[in-house]
Amino acid sequence: MTAPVKKNDRLIVHIEDLTHDGAGVAKVDGYPLFIQGGLPNESAEVHVVKTLKNYGFAKIVDIKESSPDRVEAPCPIFDQCGGCQLQHLSYEGQLKWKQNMVENVMKRIGKIDVPVLPVKGMQDPWHYRNKAQIPFGVDGDVPIAGFYKTKSHHIVDTNRCLIQGEEADAILMGLKPKLWSLGLTPYDEISQRGILRHVVVRKARTTNEVMVVLVTKGRKLKEKEAIIKAIIELIPNVKSIMHNINSQDTNVIFGNDTLLLWGKEVIEDYIGDVRFEISARSFYQVNPIQTEVLYEQALDYAALTGKETVIDAYCGIGTISLFMAKKAKMVMGVEIVPQAIADAKRNAEINHLTNTFFEAGPAEEVIPRWYKEGKTADVLMVDPPRKGCDEALLTTIIEQKPRKVVYVSCNPATLARDLRILEDGGYKTQQVQPVDMFPHTAHCEVVAWLELV
Ligand code: SAH
């Protein structure tokens, strides 16, 4: 395709859609132009900044016709920070767009005509995250901390975040001015000098317990007692202060060593009535309120009576498995990360859920083997990463025919692709329920329910 526009062209376009990064999409003779900040149903004068073979990028010069759902983004650094993409769209508008997007993807990619229910959103879609990972750095010799700019490692300095909890603000506001006196000079990625790289703050919503993890370049903390005292003053409900050492020249936040500085090594939280112990490195869903909504939906579709055996593929630390174990005869979870499986086993133990079984390995290898060993399931749960289910797993499902499949997905496009395969293999998608786990971002979580027909 030759681009019908070239760099520095100015033209008026009609924006039709949003990308999964939240950029507006307009088509010029079928050629997509991505326009940051543009919303569906808007007309705008744009300036073309870059053209590639199959798509290009443009900037808004002037909005000629504004979307009725456009709002002023409440966060002052919304335009620079990479954390949120949709604050300029009203929350109702976001939910409407997400439902539409899922519906379109089901039709276009999945060729499935299935009811997509209105997105289950949050009553209060702010301050929902239970984990903040705050990078520290320097601008000249001024310490800065906040969030990364979109697709970069440039820190946007801030003292407040509207989607994090108040504990993150306390660290942003309270720790920055004290860094020098605490001996925690901020780390500079370019010169590789300084000590403090990140502060990670996690909060357990149901118990209010907080964990603070300091990630530093070296092992030595000169003012240990003063650091502990300062953190307790900033966050009175802190129950655990950990120290992680990351001496590598890397983008990864954590290093391999995690030491206890003060308090407990884990904080405790509940999802429904299942208790979880969360350590500095464990994976845990970041929106606890919507996690319950999502799992309740999956449980509702599973319609367990207590007699069923459930396989939970891609089970992580066993959150869905344990949630279902109270209602099922047996739950078997499989997950590729061995540490997550160790956490799942431990979580089963502390909840006295003896009707569970966990194995580490690729779902597409472990589940076919289970079937050969006679370990079969009535209900198969899958919750794969963005790339969707492995084809070998879908083949196993089609061959083994569990009567019900509940598919939790963080990527509607791969979900639709996989549903098509399952439908061709004898399943029928009954209902699709999107759940808004990440308000103000373009992400959308979806639960789909399939029955063997
Ligand atoms: N169900 C969990 C986690 C879902 S995230 C929860 O709700 O918390 C998806 C998980 O799939 C991750 O934990 C990832 O490590 C795991 N994973 C990725 N590829 C896998 C594979 N081939 N087999 C099994 N697990 C896999």
Image: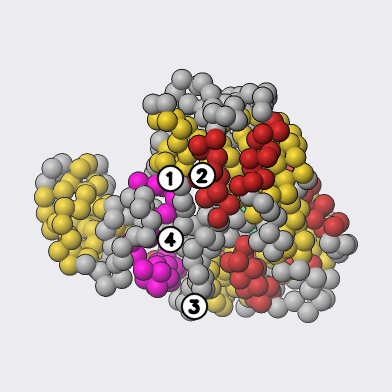
Residue assigned mark 2: 172
Counting residues from the start of the chain, the first of labels 2 and 1 encountered is: 1
Nearest the eye: 104 or 142: 142
Counting residues from the start of the chain, the first of labels 1 and 4 encountered is: 1
Using a 10 Å C-alpha cutoff, classify the residue at mark 1 as few (fewer than 14 neighbours), some (14 to 19) or many (20 or more).
some
Front label number (3 vs 2): 2
Q: Amino acid at mark 4?
A: His
Residue assigned mark 4: 440
Does residue 83 appear anywhere in the picture?
yes
Say what secondary structure mark 2 lies in. helix
Q: Is mark 2 within 8 Å of ligand 1?
A: no
Q: Please provide the residue range marked out in magenta.
A: 80-106
Nearest the eye: 236 or 7: 236
Residue assigned mark 1: 158
Q: Amino acid at mark 3?
A: Leu
Nearest the eye: 429 or 265: 265
